Amino acid sequence: MQDVYRTSNSLTKNTMHYCPGCAHGIIHKLVAESIDELGIREKTIGVAPVGCAVLAYNYFNIDCVVAAHGRAPAMATGIKRVHPDRIVFTYQGDGDLASIGAAEIVHAAMRGEKITVIFVNNAIYGMTGGQMAPTTLVGQKTTTSPYGRQVEHCGSPIRIAEMLSTIPGAYSVSRVTVTTPANLMKAKKTIKRAFQNQIDGKGLNIVEVLSTCPTNWGRTPYESMRWVDENMVPYYPLGDFKVPEEAK
Amino acid sequence: MKKVVIDAERCKGCELCVKYCPKQCLDIADSTNSKGYLPAFLAREDDCISCGICGRMCPDSAIEVFKP
């Protein structure tokens, strides 16, 4: 029997605590496979956020630390500056990076820190019970916007990838999703490139991954994937917003 | 050895593998695992083309795919 697909060595054997069908598990696998393929497992340090992925250190078979809410880029900055030979990445959700941690990511990008940021955007606060996030779509119902998000009251959703692509210090900025096998392969390629850029001494590299939250959206995992394609992708277009020619 | 090996104890029955399988080879079992989830299983192995999509789309790393 020839192997077609096997679990990555950069993931531990622990069963994930995520809800059934949560795309966090898929994104974890993409990060782990990229680390495997680049052969950097022994020198990679991960920074976990506060949010659903706070326990990511249980699943990545690498050294991890957890930062205070939103401060993962600041902590990654410190680690990378003390250990410039290590590969440092943060794994953050939208409640972490786009809300309380907005200042940290903007200034880490401004300084051009040589880190990789995996930004998982599912348009809701998952761990705390489905409250409205800065990335919640207009009209989307959450526990704190039961009639749908209204622009006059809460403003418009923030597009992090577009915003960061205007900052000169950001080296590569892309948005991907994992809703179909084709999108999954593109996401894998983009995440791997974001790590390769860091190995080449470039930064800051951010990959925004559109994700799902079946539990708080009240949809099945498969319907959630379709909901991303139909509702999130029109507002958060996929693609590379800023990737230098030499990195392509 | 089967083409698709599913660890029923890791599976949470999210059905993503069942929905994404291009040949509709997978199904959800009738009996639960120890956590109370209904796991997926390879129902029609003859139709399976070992493409690996179920393994890649599985959020819980419960699936490994092999080609004879």
Image (tube, coloured by chain):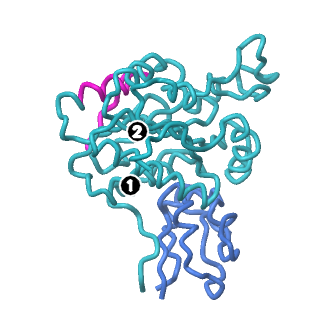
Chain colours: A cyan, B blue
Spot the residue most to the top.
A153
Quadrant housing residue A216: top right
The span picked out in magenta is: A63-79
Q: Residue at x 79, y 24 (%)?
A: A148
**Coordinates of residue B54 in the picture (x, y in percent):** 58, 67
Q: Would residue A232 appear left or right of A194 to someone viewing this image?
A: right
Which residue has dot 1 on it?
Answer: A34
Q: Is residue A225 above or below residue A111?
A: below
Give the residue type at disc 2.
Answer: Leu
As shown in the figure, which amino acid type bears the numbered disc 1?
Answer: Ser
Residue A243: percent from the left, percent from the top?
A: 47, 41
Same subunit, tags 2 and 1: yes
**Subunit under mark 2:** A
Please rate how many residues cluster around mark 1, counting C-alpha atoms within 10 Å: few if below 14, some from 14 to 19, many from 20.
many
Kindly indicate the quadrant of the structure image that contains residue A106: top left
Element carrying mark 2: helix
Q: Residue at x 47, y 60 (%)?
A: B61
